[in-house]
Image (cartoon, rainbow, N blue to C red):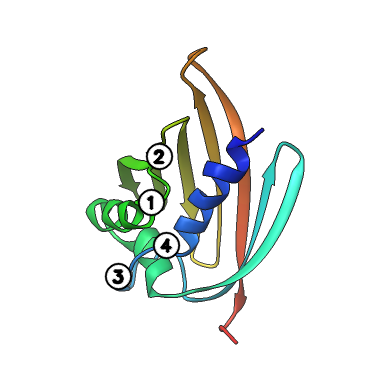
Amino acid sequence: MKIASTVLVPGLIAVTFGYSGWLNASDRMTPGQWELTTTTKGDTRVVKFCADANTLSIANGDARTGQDALSRIHTKTRCKVDAFKVEGSTVSYTLNCPDTTVRFTETYHGDRYEGVGVVLNAKTASEEIGSTYKARRLGACP
């Protein structure tokens, strides 16, 4: 299915490599090197990355900061970020793209997080799990 490569993976990367922000004592995501494991239709991928100020802005910012950051990232994908919400340790948002819509929900625990991307099929008005993912902090960035 084309959806995994065109929306889900860029969406997860956008969360990983978002826009700048600041940190405070209530950070949902801790700075450092992370390992992200994504499973889409039985295919598992592992990526290591450093959570920089851009990444932390989406995870730790408020709804406006997060939505602004993702909107800038997704100008090239032609996806529109909608319904960006922050509720405690959970961040959720919807990407409305030309061919599909995906709803992401991530729950952060400082040194780990997990999430799911749900694909909304406009033709059948059905939902299906597109990707599940989990990440863990490995330590300081190299």
Say if mark 4 contacts mark 2, CB within 8 Å.
Answer: no
Mark linked to residue 74: 1
Q: Is residue 129 left or right of residue 43?
A: left
Say if mark 1 contacts mark 4, CB within 8 Å.
Answer: no
Vertical relation: 10 (above or below) 105:
below
Secondary element under disc 2, as helix, strand or loop, is strand
Hey, which quadrant is residue 80 in on the image? top left
Q: Nearer the viewer, residue 105 or 19?
A: 19
- For label 4, count other residues whose C-alpha is less than 10 Å away and answer few (under 14), some (14-19) or many (20+): many
Q: Closer to the N terminus: mark 1 or mark 3? A: 3
Say if mark 1 contacts mark 3, CB within 8 Å.
Answer: no
Q: Please name which of the two marks, 4 or 2, marks the residue nearer to the observer.
A: 2
Q: Closer to the N terminus: mark 3 or mark 4? A: 3
Work out how far the residue at label 3 is from the one at label 4, CA to CA, in angstroms: 13 Å
Which residue shows up at 40% across the image and 43% down it?
92
Mark linked to residue 95: 2
Say if mark 2 contacts mark 1, CB within 8 Å.
Answer: yes
Q: Label 3 amino acid?
A: Gly
Q: Label 2 amino acid?
A: Leu
Which residue shows up at 34% across the image and 51% down it?
75
Q: Please name which of the two marks, 2 or 3, marks the residue nearer to the observer.
A: 2
Q: Closer to the N terminus: mark 4 or mark 2? A: 4
Q: Closer to the N terminus: mark 2 or mark 3? A: 3
Secondary element under disc 1, as helix, strand or loop, is loop
In the rendering, at what x and y percent does residue 131 appear? 62, 41
In the rendering, at what x and y percent does residue 27 appear? 38, 67
Q: Quadrant of the N terminus?
A: top right
Q: Quadrant of the C terminus?
A: bottom right
**What residue does disc 3 label?**
21
Work out how far the residue at label 4 is from the one at label 2, CA to CA, in angstroms: 21 Å
**What residue does disc 4 label?**
28
